[in-house]
Amino acid sequence: MSQVRAGGCPFVGTTRCGRPTGRHYTVAHLLPARQTLPPRPPRSISLAGTVPYHTSYLLIHARDPPSEWPSTFTNQLYLDCKRRLKEHHGLVNFCWLGEQAGGDRSEDAYSATLWKESNSHEICHRVELPLISTRSLGMVVESVDRNISLPRDEDMAASSGPYFYVCTHQKRDCRCGIRGGDLFRCFQKELDIRGMLFDHNGKSRVVEVGHVGGHKNAPNLLIFPHGDWYGNLESKDLPKLIDHYVRSLEDIPTSLPLLNEPNRFQWRGRLGMTQQEQSDVFHGLESGVTDALGFSGLL
């Protein structure tokens, strides 16, 4: 057994997350002891306005499962991407696609997925980057800066979404590891029942990601190609969430965040919106005033 310090959870000290030698496990497959976690925030309090403004999200395909991720990423490629993309309002994270993901095994070369704001306000464009390294950061920045405007049906076919990214970063915060791991497994089960667990390329529609911010709101969820963020979710929320985002890809003009009952308070924000805009959208929908951001008549 190895002892792992729960850096984000001083109230429980350390947590023991053992696994058999020589076999890789994701955080969602670990069965950590159920520490006494702090209570969840009340679900009647809105989380809108808690997503930092960003116009792109780079997900580097990790070579190691989330159970082996450090509490803070010190990978040089990650740090360089984070520094360069910050100037372009971009966020960077690691995600785990499975044993074969991650591209070249050389020290600084990885594959990655880039989600970025497109000229259509409704959904993000997806760019698959087969190989990025510290020497090719210019190409990454160029991909972020390039204006992309595809026909909606073409963009939808390319994305083959929706995709659900769940934070399960155990060593960063045990709430993310435990609550996020539970939500990840529930997503797998629900999507499998629907025959939706994998897209037409054989890629899973639910993916584990590193720290996204907002430990207290765990489990945190990102949904693409919409770019929506949610927090403080429960398993009972998933059927309606999935239904909504599947339908929204069939009818893009109504790809509104799910702000009707029961999940409106769990919506944190969206890629491409400032924190003030996120708050305005939530309160505008609450009061029926949505013209300012182009969301009128969509409920």
Image: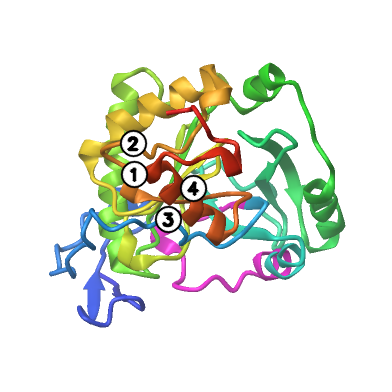
Task: Say what secondary structure mark 1 lies in.
Answer: helix
Magenta-tinted stretch:
59-81
Q: Are marks 3 and 2 in contact (CB under 8 Å)?
A: no
For disc 2, the neighbor class at 10 Å (few under 14, some 14 to 19, many from 20) is few
Gap in Å between the C-alphas at discs 1 and 2?
5 Å
Q: Please name the amino acid that badge 4 sits on.
A: Val
Q: Are marks 1 and 2 in contact (CB under 8 Å)?
A: yes
Q: Earlier in the sequence, mark 3 or mark 4?
A: 3
Task: Say what secondary structure mark 4 lies in.
Answer: helix
Image quarter where the N terminus lies is bottom left
Q: Indicate left or right for 246 with 108 as reference.
A: left
Is residue 202 in view from this perspective?
Answer: no
Q: Are marks 3 and 4 in contact (CB under 8 Å)?
A: yes
Q: Locate residue 198, reporting x and y percent.
A: 46, 25
Q: Is residue 159 magenta?
A: no
For disc 3, the neighbor class at 10 Å (few under 14, some 14 to 19, many from 20) is many
Q: Earlier in the sequence, mark 1 or mark 3?
A: 3
Gap in Å between the C-alphas at discs 2 and 4?
12 Å
Q: Is residue 78 magenta?
A: yes
Q: Residue at x 29, y 45 (%)?
A: 183
The residue singled out by tag 4 in the image is 281
- The tag on residue 264 is 1
Q: Please name the amino acid that badge 1 sits on.
A: Arg
Image quarter where the C terminus lies is top left
Quadrant in the picture for residue 48: bottom left
Task: Say what secondary structure mark 3 lies in.
Answer: loop
The residue singled out by tag 3 in the image is 48
